[in-house]
Image: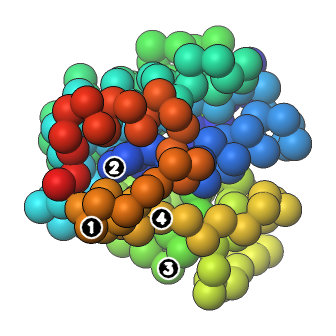
Amino acid sequence: MKVGLFFGSFNPIHTGHMIIANYMANHTDLQQVWLVVSPHNPLKEKSDLINMYDRLEMARLATEDAMNIRVSDAELKLPQPSYTIDTLTYLHEKYPEHEFSLIMGSDNLLSLKKWKNYELILRDYHIHIYPRPGYDKHDFKDHPSISFTETPLMELSATFIRNAVKAKKNVQYFVPDKVLKFIEGKNLYK
């Protein structure tokens, strides 16, 4: 099975993530998308992250009714910080029957050369790119391992949602209903 791995902190998971995952699972050659909850991206600050198990639970709640979208806790089981190449190796060994690809935003192309063993990723895996506001195709526009998709442009961010919750603003429709109830029930991002 062709599985797209959509890595993220999902802090919190929001409607934009779900639209991207749905597009990839239904409008590309991928048969399934796995949301891989990352404990901590080595290239980002950790200070704003809530508990990784709460982020995992929100991702599970958001995908309960999704047909081709699953949640993976693979990175929670691996040494931290988590590196994409290590997770890919782990998943390839655990699920040899699947053909894994990456899903990432065009903004990540700017930092791809900073990733651990990025050359191996480009050699051994396909990458599906979704557009991000203000980022074009850069150095990788003609790379054979990279496909640029027509995924709807999403300007919604988890930072916006966290700030809105902190300011006591309504975030209904920005996050799935079950996720909103979880955030409110645990008093997160206040």
| Residue assigned mark 2 | 11
Does residue 102 lie above or below 67 as drawn? below
Residue 110, label in figure: 3
Task: Give the x, y percent position of residue 106.
Answer: 62, 71
Q: Secondary structure at mark 1?
A: loop
Spatial separation of the CA atoms under disc 4 and disc 2:
9 Å
Q: Mark 1 belongs to which amino acid?
A: Ala
Give the residue displayed 37% in from the left and 47% down from the top. Answer: 12
Give the residue displayed 42% in from the left and 38% down from the top. Answer: 180
Q: Earlier in the sequence, mark 4 or mark 2?
A: 2
Circle 1 packing at 10 Å, graded few (<14), some (14-19), many (20+), is: few
| Residue assigned mark 1 | 167
Q: Earlier in the sequence, mark 3 or mark 2?
A: 2
Q: Secondary structure at mark 3?
A: helix
Task: Give the x, y percent position of residue 24.
Answer: 75, 43
Spatial separation of the CA atoms under disc 1 and disc 2:
16 Å
Circle 4 packing at 10 Å, graded few (<14), some (14-19), many (20+), is: some
Q: Mark 3 belongs to which amino acid?
A: Leu
Label 3 or label 1, whichever lies nearer to me, is: 1
Give the residue displayed 56% in from the left and 25% down from the top. Answer: 63
Q: Quadrant of the C terminus?
A: bottom left
Does residue 124 lie above or below 62 as drawn? below
Task: Give the x, y percent position of residue 34.
Answer: 56, 30
Q: Earlier in the sequence, mark 4 or mark 3?
A: 3
Circle 2 packing at 10 Å, graded few (<14), some (14-19), many (20+), is: many
Does residue 56 lie above or below 47 as drawn? above
Spatial separation of the CA atoms under disc 4 and disc 1:
16 Å
Q: Are marks 4 and 2 in contact (CB under 8 Å)?
A: no
Q: Are marks 4 and 3 in contact (CB under 8 Å)?
A: no
| Residue assigned mark 4 | 157
Label 3 or label 2, whichever lies nearer to me, is: 2
Give the residue displayed 29% in from the left and 38% down from the top. Answer: 184
